[in-house]
Amino acid sequence: MEGMDHLAHERNKTEFDVDAMKIVWAGSRHAFELSDRMARLVASDPAFRKDDRTRLGRKGILRLTEEEAGQLRNFVDEPSFTDLHWGMFVPAIKGQGTDEQQQKWLPLAYKMQIIGCYAQTELGHGSNVQGLETTATFDPDTDEFVIHSPTLTSSKWWPGGLGKISTHAIVYARLITNGQEHGVHGFIVQLRSLDDHMPLPGITIGDIGMKFGNGAYNTMDNGVLKFDHIRIPRNQMLMRVLQVTREGKCVQSNVPRQLIYGTMVFVRQTIVADASTALSRAVCIATRYSAVRRQFGSQDGGMETQVIDYKTQQSRLFPLLASAYAFRFVGEWLKWLYMDVTQRLQAKDFSTLPEAHACTAGLKSLTTTATADAIEECRKLCGGHGYLCASGLPELFAVYVPACTYEGDNVVLLLQVARFLMKTDLLHCCCDVQRAEDWLKPGVVLEAFEARSARMCVACAKNLSKFENPEDGFAELSADLVEAAVAHCQLIVVSKFIDKLQQDIPGKGVKQQLQNLCYIYVVNLVHKYLGDFLSTGCITPKQASLANDQLRSLYSQIRPNAIALVDAFNYTDHYLGSVLGRSDGNVYPKLYEEAWKDPLNDSVVPDGYHEYVHPMLKQQLRNARL
């Protein structure tokens, strides 16, 4: 029935202050009010309809603060060239450009008088940046660099915004001066005319074609780019780390090369924050629908059992709900880490950059992999209806899944973390669980995860020492090293969730619910990675059994609060874009209505019926044009 809240009975079970939890999820009251205002603005404006993905037509007359504009962009909820302009092009100039270069290029970028993209990946090389083939050869006679694509595989491939929109790019190429190579560096290159938008002479540029999904990421113009001896001024090489003089000599600045990690830290902490958002959207849909859907269990003609009450559903769904909160809080910590790194860079302190880079690389890998898998799991948790585009989950998955490979392939990133860990001093710890309730003690939990991480790293280090050539050992043991890196990253997430619980968290029952979610996340990981914990001697089989007992108890405590915990995300129905995840639970009538909107239902008799189907039904196949 229209206007009726079909989930009211669920919300009446809530044992905590939902409004207070909304503040915790948003990060602050200001952040909550800002996101709430922007979400409602987008949801109420027909220009932002998501069913036909209409682009914003009033952008030129809106007057928003930069903070409001950022939130508005999030809730429009459609991949766009602006994502790469603000997310990669501008940060690259900030992080790798000299003061003079920033003064020249950033004002143009901020006003969008130029639109930029980040052209690193090539047709033949992605993760192996040092294998890029595009060249930038210095010509001392003209004081210019000649940018060239010497092979087909050197074509830039995948940069978002490149295909149709970007006027400029940060192009990564092999620096060559006086016949010598000096590694891969970034160059600001104009691609299209600012008058008629035509590609400049010597530049071949276009879109790489359709990608996975219906709409999904296909709103982004991922491009292909080839250079035929394009000349740019010498001062368009990003020179904060390395300068090329008028004579073609390379001069290292007093800024270490690790400075580029600063840009990576920014980009990857953003990706981790995005992971919590995507995961929470999927979990919100699956949780609400699990409370609406009823199957089996009817006795004496009574109502069937809510799917969310089945323990099998809870054991699959509630760890994902806990993960959404866990990723949110580790994302907050990464944001703090980026601010700390930025302040240190300004003070010429580069000491924390390698560790910050390792943390963000590992957490980018961990959270995006887990989120992509979780969105698909949420689709399956919604049964057959989850496969409908109207559920919102197929589209969400298609939009999100490229995060597992862009900005670093997830396995390659974990191997980078493993290299860092092999250089780190590790402490030996153990686990002291005697009763099931001990798994709710922060100290006990941290000891178990620290012991697992340390012992897996030590085992890898010992095995590496058996190889004469460390690189041979690294290649041979790469699978073990990846597992050790995952253990380390999970330790970080667990520790930051526990740190969050040490803070003063206002609101009736809010802290208790967060504690329940934290320990669901923790104990589910113990259950899922039991082999690691047992094989390294971190816990005993008895302690593992106690963990499972505690997990079942935690599910029962979360159950009456499940709907309220996803309500705390404060997502509008417009933003969720899901009939199954409607806040009022009015799923079946709306799903029925949605079916009739499909253009296939515009006619009763389908095209081709008289040519193919009717002759077959009448056994006139000889006369049919088949």
Image (cartoon, grey):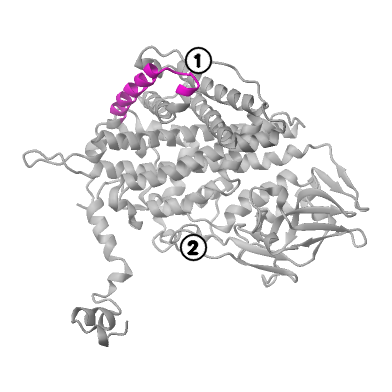
Relative to the observer, which residue lies in front, 568 or 602?
Answer: 602
Q: Is residue 459 left or right of residue 8?
A: right
Q: Is residue 554 visible?
A: yes
Which residues are the magenta region? Answer: 534-558
Category of crowding for the residue at label 2, using alpha-carbon neighbours closer than 10 angstroms: few (below 14), some (14–19), many (at least 20): few
Category of crowding for the residue at label 1, using alpha-carbon neighbours closer than 10 angstroms: few (below 14), some (14–19), many (at least 20): some
Q: Amino acid at mark 1?
A: Cys
Q: Residue at x 24, y 36 (%)?
A: 310
Q: Residue at x 74, y 58 (%)?
A: 134
- Residue 551 counted in the magenta span: yes
Q: Amino acid at mark 2?
A: Arg
Look at the numbered disc 1 and give the secondary structure of its residue: loop
- Residue 161 counted in the magenta span: no
| Residue bearing the label numbered 1 | 430
Q: Where is residue 16 drawn, in percent x and y?
A: 33, 28
Relative to the observer, which residue lies in front, 24 or 495?
Answer: 495
